[in-house]
Image (cartoon, rainbow, N blue to C red):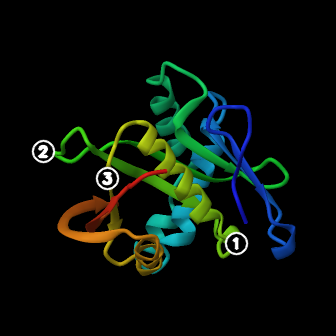
Amino acid sequence: MSLTQTAKRDELTYTSENRGVGTLKIRPALDTDDGAIANVHLRTWQESYVGQLSQEFLDGLQIEEWNAQWRNRFSRINEWPCPDILVLENEEGLVVGMAAVGACRDTGATAMVGELQAIYLRSEYSGRGWGRELQDVCFKRLRELGYSCATLWVLDSNTRARNFYEKSGWKSDGAQKEDQIGDQTVTELRYSIDLGED
């Protein structure tokens, strides 16, 4: 499978009929995408964190709260489409994945360090290579922004995500932190990668 860039900036599509995975489109977020992004974000948490976060907490997540969080984030964006927030659409045009990139938010990070702040794909689309394609577009955008390397944070218990990152070249750099999610204290590990050249 291969990515084909269209005339619109940062909009890429590919078709892979031989593998039967259909067509995806990865594009910059529009100001009307907040609800779709919130839905993907919430549903992937409920799918991905089973056994890592309490089921009571996951079942109690409310879409209204996630919609409000994304509307608030969108309200601070001045230019649309926004290439720093990416959405992935399936062949029917439904948003089934999302990602966000930007400057590294860690204290003391230099101006050359970017961050993969979020990347989520609905579970029924895993195994198609779509997550890897979405990550590749994130790398492209981070390089466009002038970053030479990037970081991300992942739960230490999230073995599936950590395996995905490690197969993509990310490496744990030894940093970790504790965070509070619901009533649980969790440990997050930082991963880093050299972005190289496009």
The local crowd at label 2, few if under 14, some if 14 to 19, many if 20 or more residues have their Cα within 10 Å, is few
Looking at the image, residue 164 lies above or below residue 142? below
Pick the front one: 102 or 154? 102
Q: Amino acid at mark 2?
A: Gly
Q: Nearer the viewer, mark 1 or mark 3?
A: 3
Is 23 rendered above or below residue 76? below
Residue sitting nearer the eye, 185 or 187? 187
Picture residue at 50% right of the left edge, 76% below the top: 50
Spatial separation of the CA atoms under disc 1 and disc 3: 26 Å
Counting the numbered discs, the total is: 3
Q: Is residue 152 above or below residue 142?
A: below
Question: Element at badge 2?
Answer: loop
Give the spatial CA distance, label 2 vs label 3: 15 Å
Query: Label 3 belongs to which residue?
Result: 149
Q: Estimate the spatial distance between the alpha carbons at disc 2 and disc 1, rounded to whole Å.
A: 37 Å
Q: Give the amino acid at mark 3.
A: Cys
Q: Is residue 14 visible?
A: yes
Q: Is residue 173 left or right of residue 29?
A: left
> Which quadrant is the N terminus positioned in?
bottom right
Q: Is residue 40 above or below residue 132?
A: above
Residue 67 x %, y %: 56, 40
Q: Residue at x 46, y 76 (%)?
A: 167
Is 4 positioned to the left or the right of 114 in the image?
Answer: right
Q: Residue furthest left?
A: 108
Closer to the eye: label 2 or 3: 3
- In this figure, which residue is indicated by the disc labeled 1? 128
Q: Which disc is residue 147 wearing?
A: none
**Circle 1 sits in a helix, a strand or a loop, which is it?**
loop
Tag 1: amino acid: Arg
Tell me if I can see residue 186 in this picture. no
Residue 108 circle label: 2
First in residue order: circle 2 vs circle 3? 2
